[in-house]
Image (cartoon, rainbow, N blue to C red):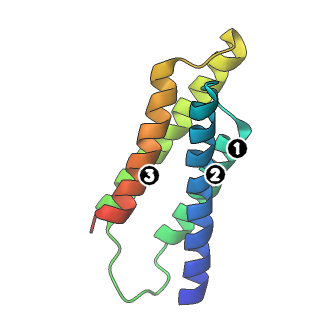
């Protein structure tokens, strides 16, 4: 069971890497737009995160405050991606505040995962 949990954790990290990595690419290229890879990364990280939050018969207690915080940030990132994509379709660009919030909140979500004990 722990091996399966490790595999799901790896998939969750891949989703984070897809989201944050594509954000970094957009930042470095100067386009600062919303890409499909960002949306896919968010979806992969969300689904794997929800699977990880399920009690699998693990021998320790889950920190529901941490999980709730991470889920709330995930919802905000999803909303920002949706709003940014809509603005991008309408005007051709994403407002800088939305673009920067996506990156900052994605990094904050990873920091919470690693640093919150």
Location of residue 44 by image quarter: bottom right
Give the position of the N terminus as an image quadrant.
bottom right
Q: Earlier in the sequence, mark 1 or mark 3?
A: 1
Pointer 2: residues within 10 angstroms few (<14), some, or many (20+)?
Answer: many
Q: What residue is disc 2 on?
A: 18
Q: Earlier in the sequence, mark 2 or mark 3?
A: 2
Q: Are marks 1 and 2 in contact (CB under 8 Å)?
A: yes
Q: What residue is disc 3 on?
A: 71
Give the position of the C terminus as an image quadrant.
bottom left
Location of residue 45 by image quarter: bottom right
Q: CA distance from mark 2 to mark 3?
A: 18 Å
Q: Are marks 2 and 3 in contact (CB under 8 Å)?
A: no
Q: Residue at x 50, y 82 (%)?
A: 56
Q: Earlier in the sequence, mark 1 or mark 2?
A: 2
For marks 1 and 3, give the one nearer the viewer.
Answer: 1
In the rendered image of this protein, does residue 114 appear above or below residue 16?
Answer: below
Residue 37, disc: 1
Residue 34 location, x and y as percent? Answer: 64, 30
Q: Secondary structure at mark 3?
A: helix
Q: Is residue 110 left or right of residue 34?
A: left
Q: Is residue 51 visible?
A: yes
């Amino acid at each position: 069971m722990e091996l399966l949990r490790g595999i799901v954790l790896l998939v969750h990290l891949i989703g984070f890497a897809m989201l944050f990595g594509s954000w970094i690419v957009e930042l470095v290229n100067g386009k600062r737009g919303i890409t499909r890879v960002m949306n896919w990364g968010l979806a992969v990280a969300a689904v794997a995160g929800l699977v990880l939050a399920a009690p699998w018969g693990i021998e320790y207690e889950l920190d529901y405050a941490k999980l709730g915080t991470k889920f709330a940030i995930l919802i905000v990132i999803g909303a920002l991606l949706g709003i940014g994509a809509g603005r991008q379709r309408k005007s051709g660009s994403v407002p800088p505040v939305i673009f920067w919030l996506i990156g900052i909140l994605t990094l904050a979500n990873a920091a919470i995962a690693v640093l919150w004990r």
